Amino acid sequence: MKAISLSVLASTISGGRPRARVGWCLALCLAVIAGRPAARAQGVIVANATLAGTDVGGGEYAYALTLNNTSASTTPIALFWFAWIGGGASFMSSLPTAIQTPAGWGSVVTGGGDEDGYSIQFSTHTSPLRPGSSVTFNFLSLDSPALMAGPAVLYPEYPTLSSQVYSGATGYGVQDIFTAKVVQPVPEPNSWFLVGLGLLTLGLVQRRNRNK
């Protein structure tokens, strides 16, 4: 069946009978609708993050930052901007160092100067975080967990751990805004082994003292 141009339909409508014009008007509407591309469904991101800090001495803390793209999301995450909010404000008081990222992810420290704090932008073009998945980043900082958990020093109206995620690696597409939570670090398996060994040694010493 040959396609009927909109101009032909319009001229036919203007010159036809009233009842015919109604039919042609309906045909014109259907032609316009059929000619439009279908709108893409907008995705959803529901994300959160946790920050666990360990005192490594010298006033420095080793942090493990875990980003969770929950199962309620329908879109992967390709950009995670930590301690930052749209508009350009960065919230960490000290410069983060020794940043480590998983394979496929990169990092850039943003902010700094007398009137701004620091933030970290984690992004990937090859390994987006899919719904129901998690990824962990590591860094060192002079900011204590208590400082991280409070309001930003330079922007006290915002939590230090304010963060945003995007579906696009350059900060576009679907996004979500949330505040990461400070949590207690989970001991490594080696730490549990040392604790168990210490308890065993203490038990043997107490038993020997009782025998004496």
Image (tube, helix red, strand yellow):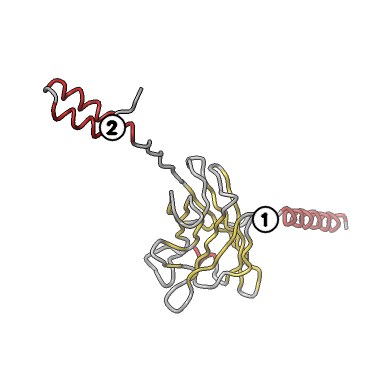
Which numbered marker is on residue 144?
Answer: none
Secondary structure beneath dot 2 equals loop
Q: Which mark is residue 5?
A: 2
Quarter of the image containing the C terminus? bottom right
Query: Looking at the image, which residue is at 53% across and 58% down?
Result: 182
Q: Seen in the image, is 140 located left or right of residue 10?
A: right
| Mark 2 surroundings: few (<14), some (14-19) or many (≥20) residues within 10 A | few
Which residue is most to the left? 18
Q: Nearer the viewer, residue 168 or 71?
A: 168
At 45% from the left and 67% from the top, the residue drawn is 90
Q: Position of residue 162 (x, y in %)?
A: 45, 60
Q: Classify 10 Å Cα crowding around label 1: few (below 14), some (14-19), many (20 and above).
A: few
Amino acid on which the number 2 mark rests in the picture? Ser
Q: Amino acid at mark 1?
A: Pro
Residue 31 quadrant: top left
Relative to residue 208, is residue 31 drawn left or right?
A: left
Q: Residue furthest right?
A: 212
Count up the numbered dots: 2
Element type at mark 1? loop
Q: Position of residue 119 (x, y in %)?
A: 50, 66
Q: Residue at x 34, y 36 (%)?
A: 36
At a point 39% along the width and 68% down the height, the residue shown is: 156
The answer to whether marks 1 and 2 mark residues whose Cβ atoms lie closer than 8 Å is no
Kindly identify which residue carries mark 1.
187
- Quarter holding the N terminus is top left
Q: What x and y, as percent, mark residue 136?
A: 60, 54
User: Which of these two is toward me, 138 or 144?
Assistant: 138
Work out whether 200 lies above or below 17: below
Which circle, 1 or 2, is nearer the viewer? Answer: 2
As measured in the structure, the alpha-carbon distance from the residue carrying label 1 to the one carrying label 2 is: 71 Å
Q: Is residue 31 left or right of residue 66?
A: left
Tell which circle, 1 or 2, labels the residue nearer the N-terminal end: 2
